[in-house]
Image: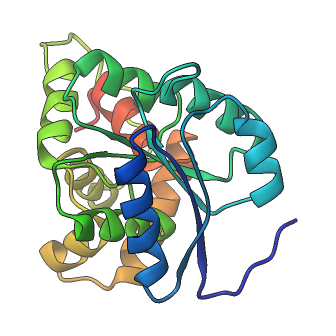
């Protein structure tokens, strides 16, 4: 098992644009509590890289030559499922978004967003959240929003409060936003979401949201 300074988040970058790659590295190195342990132009050696670095978070460009980001994501999740992977792209391509999410992406952030949004996304994913820019979240929800004749009998035993929190997750709320919306502590939100995960038998926000929509739970 890999141990790191408890306040230090280790991050690896996969980005084919050299100037952006260097810019991201400098940004991360400037942030207190974060360190960039490697920056690479594609995913050709992704397993060797991750095995050597064992980062906490990977910032993964989607459109790279040789081995693209979605293939890299799949390889990482197969070997190192505990590593958080945030996808990054300039495109709002529904197929790519959904493929990345179904392959286990922990977040999806558009490159046009400010650098601080990326930093917030890293912090959120480390706290168990699923950072996703609103336009991306909307596209994902639109994909699932076609009327479905789902039986509501399969409730999974969720309480009314758990269902309420699940609905907010589906709407793209972060843990912190849910805490503010429902006037409950962050720790209480965390506890409810742990219970939701257990009842739905999932291990991530994106999986919970996907199941909730497919099963008509919200």
Residue at 50% across, 59% down? 195
Residue toward you, 217 or 108: 108
Counting labels gives 0
User: Can residue 128 be seen?
Assistant: no
Residue toward you, 131 or 212: 131
Please, is residue 27 above or below residue 152 in the view? below
The location of residue 121, given as percent across then percent down, is: 34, 63
Residue at 76% across, 59% down? 53
The location of residue 131, given as percent across then percent down, is: 32, 55
The location of residue 39, given as percent across then percent down, is: 57, 54
- Which residue lies most toward the right here? 1
Residue at 45% across, 37% down? 16
Q: Quadrant of residue 150?
A: top left
Residue at 75% across, 47% down? 49
Q: In screen coordinates, is 159 left or right of 77?
A: left
Q: Quadrant of residue 57?
A: bottom right
Q: In screen coordinates, is 211 left or right of 41?
A: left
Where does the N terminus fall, quadrant-wise? Answer: bottom right
The location of residue 99, given as percent across then percent down, is: 41, 21
Residue toward you, 44 or 2: 44
């Amino acid at each position: 098992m890999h141990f790191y300074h408890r306040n230090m988040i280790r991050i690896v970058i996969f980005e084919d644009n050299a100037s952006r790659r260097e810019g991201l590295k400098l940004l991360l190195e400037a942030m207190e509590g974060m360190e960039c342990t490697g920056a690479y132009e594609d995913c050709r050696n992704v397993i060797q890289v991750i095995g050597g670095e064992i980062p906490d978070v990977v910032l993964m460009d989607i459109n790279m030559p040789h081995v693209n980001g979605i293939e890299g994501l799949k390889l990482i999740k197969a070997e190192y499922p505990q590593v958080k992977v945030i996808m990054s792209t300039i495109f709002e391509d529904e197929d790519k978004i959904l493929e990345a999410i179904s392959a286990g992406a922990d977040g999806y952030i558009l490159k046009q967003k400010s650098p601080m949004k990326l930093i917030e996304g890293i912090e959120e994913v480390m706290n168990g959240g699923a950072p996703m820019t609103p336009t991306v979240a909307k596209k994902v929800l639109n994909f699932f929003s076609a009327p479905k004749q789902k039986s509501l009998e399969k409730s999974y035993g969720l309480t009314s409060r758990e269902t309420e929190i699940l609905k907010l997750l589906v709407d793209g709320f972060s843990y912190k936003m849910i805490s503010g919306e429902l006037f409950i502590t962050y720790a209480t939100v965390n506890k409810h979401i742990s219970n939701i995960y257990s009842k739905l038998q999932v291990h991530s926000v994106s999986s919970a949201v996907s199941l909730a929509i497919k099963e008509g739970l919200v």
